[in-house]
Amino acid sequence: MTGHVYVSRRLSAAPMTALESLGVPIVVHPDPDWPPSRGELLDAVRGASALVTLLTERVDTELLKATGNALQIVANCAVGYDNVDVNAASSRGVVVTNTPGVLDEATADCAFGLILAMARRLVEADRFMRTGKEWIWAPQSFVGIDVSAGATLGIVGLGRIGMAVARRAHAFNMRILATGSRADNREAAAFGVQAVEIGTLLRESDIVSLHCPLTSDTRHLIGAPELDIMKASSILVNTARGPIVDEEALVEALESRIIAGAALDVYEQEPRPHPRLVKLENVVLLPHIASAGEATRNAMCQLAVDNVRAVLNGERPPTPVAG
Ligand code: DGY
């Protein structure tokens, strides 16, 4: 017997309608803006055959057990799935899916927006204007990095999103260094990407942008030793996952000007950035919105629903990560 589909936050309209048309009961967490508490989640998933989860839900053995035996799929509505214990799901025969591909451009737009905002000190200048302080044009006022005069961009983890960032950087005449499995493929070469070791990337880049997934290998990939070898004038951009950066070490590096600045969309302990981070002037901070384009969010939700539909119909889902 097919149990309900549990959705941990209301999806956008069209995907929600598509989900409702599957003909199985749907249970949607009532608060559109705030996730279910752990207790609410454990209760609500009991007997479910499918879960549509977000990165705010920890899908681990406890949660999988709480569903009972009917669960067939965890459709994570995000490209990252570090919140899901994929091995635990697989060992129970539960398919895990994510939403790759549909958010590459939106995320790259946001990363590039952060690169420009930080390099040209746009948010800092905006904050200054709001103080009402006296100003007049001056040669040294808010001088930043000349992005399109050959600044070097280091892309850590050149996958689909990193490649979309490389395409933008190429159009801005940047020198591009990258790590990752695609860094020396033909597409990367067309954008002038040079595949390098991470040490070279960190030492030579004016801007370092992170695009790798969070795994046990990439947790704290950027810590004090890595920040130490970056240029004092460089900036770090993170639109990937917070724990890739040791946030305590980053705050210390920013306070002592080991690097010049950071632009972050993600944090080690979401939703709370390090308390000293929010006091710094040399940072731009966003609330994990890199994929927040309207069409992008619809496409992510639709892909999650397509995955649920396929699995409940006994078909192979479009974007499985395992199972
Ligand atoms: C993802 O998809 O992993 C993003 O972090 C949220 O869009």
Image (cartoon, helix red, strand yellow):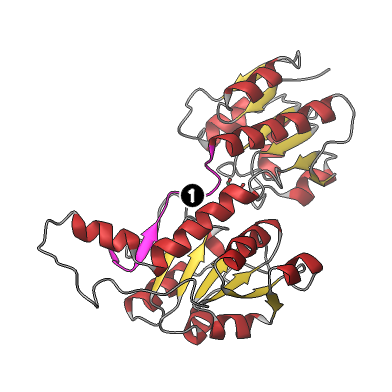
In the rendered view, does 127 fall on the left or right side of 320? left
Q: Quadrant of the C terminus?
A: top right
Mark 1: amino acid: His
**What is the magenta range?**
278-293
Can the viewer see residue 278 in this picture? no
Residue closest to the eye, 113 or 317: 113
Residue closest to the eye, 270 or 110: 110
User: Quadrant of residue 96 in the image?
Assistant: top right
In the rendered view, does 229 fall on the left or right side of 79? left
Is residue 147 positioned above or below 49 on the image? below
Q: Residue at the location (40% across, 82% down)?
A: 258
Per the picture, the main secondary structure of the magenta-coloured stretch is loop
Q: Is residue 196 magenta?
A: no
- Decide if ligand 1 comes within 8 Å of the CB at mark 1: yes
The number of callouts visible is 1
Is residue 294 positioned above or below 116 on the image? above
